[in-house]
Amino acid sequence: MVTIAIPHRFDGGKNRQGSIVIAHRGAAGYRPEHTLASYELAAQLGADFLEPDLVVTSDGVLVCRHEPEIGDTTDVARHPEFASRKTTKILDGKAVTGWFTEDFTLAELKTLRVVERLPHIRQHNTLFNGRYEIPTFQEMLDLRARLSEALRRELGVYPETKHPTFFSNAGLPLEPRLLEILRRNRLNRPDAPVFVQSFEVTSLTQLREAGLRTKSVQLLAASGAPFDTVTAGSGPTYADLSTPDGLRGIAHYAQGIGPDKLQVIPRKADGTLGCTTTLVIDAHHAGLLVHPYTFRAENNFLPVDYQSAAVPTDYGRAIDEQITYLRAGLDGLFTDQADIGVIARAEFRATTPASG
């Protein structure tokens, strides 16, 4: 394992306003996720970083999808020419039935159109069903470059290797493809506005050993273990990684953690927000940044005491929730509604005395 230093000219992912706002799958609260339209809107709403989840096609091209299975996020079921591609695979130990990106060429995927993944929660987003293609990672990076120029600020990119063990076992490893694209786009630099993230330790350590020079982030979960650990039959659980010793171990190959937000402030039995844990303090003591996921505006995703009504799809007190979490010392947060993150950050900064 290799430790990489963050140079002084890079401020740890912060900008002058404070912690960074990471557009989770783009502006997923307003447009179908992982589309160029979603990424573009997120940038226009003030996001600092755009987050593409990366999977791969049968001809080895990285594309932006939350999962390799695309039945819930595209119109593939309406394409009779692909009916025979429907299958069941074991994805991280669970049987999943549907259509998988690694069974399609890029040209075939480009004939599909994206649909809203949560139509019952985000009915507004269904207005845009069928209007957007699945973008490649390169297309997303090209958009990022154009938007950086148009908006006169450098947008960051925060790619995730999705299910890397699954793709490695399929003979389509994500890591060399990701590294090659970053190099080709001159983004494999310690001072580049890039965080590479993964739930699997092996994916991040392999990238580092292969020459990754950007920042990287170990994703955590409130339960379970990285699937590479499960596959190996030994290794740390997410609980192990979240301890002070575990965090110090992460610091050997990554510069930050991306925990479930409930690991920072859990909820009580009645669904209200509880007390802050020591995770942020422990991570900072280990020299790690903390970027928890995922902040969403709808009541369905909010603590009971931050909900506005019993209607799950209505917006609740999402700004207040994010301010409460920012008070815990976050270095950034993942949100489906980047504008809410920007407002929460500004209000937090306005009420927080400047340090130093």
Image (cartoon, rainbow, N blue to C red):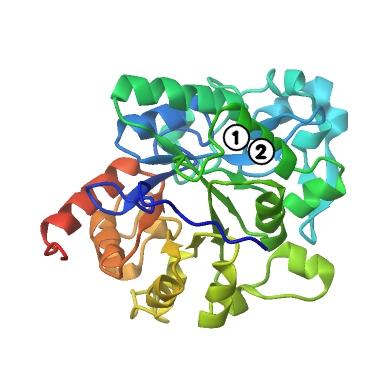
Q: Residues within 10 Å of mark 1 (few under 14, many from 20)?
A: many
> In front: 318, or 191?
191
User: Which image quarter is the N terminus in?
Assistant: bottom right
The residue beneath circle 2 is 178
Q: In this view, does 190 lie to the left or right of 353?
A: right
Q: Distance between the residues labelled 1 and 2?
A: 6 Å
Amino acid type, residue under disc 2 in the picture: Leu
Q: Name the residue under label 1.
A: 182
Q: Position of residue 58 (x, y in %)?
A: 82, 31
Answer whether residue 38 is visible to the viewer in this image: yes
Q: Residue at x 36, y 32 (%)?
A: 154
**Which of the 4 image quarters holds residue 94?**
bottom right
The reply to whether callout 1 and callout 2 are in contact (CB within 8 Å) is yes
Q: Mark 1 is on which residue type?
A: Leu
- Please give the label number shown on residue 293: none
Measuring from the top left, give residue 341's x and y in whole percent. Answer: 30, 49
SS class, disc 2: helix
**Where is the C terminus found, in terms of image quarters?**
bottom left
- Residue at coordinates 75% horizontally, 69% vertically from top-left? 229
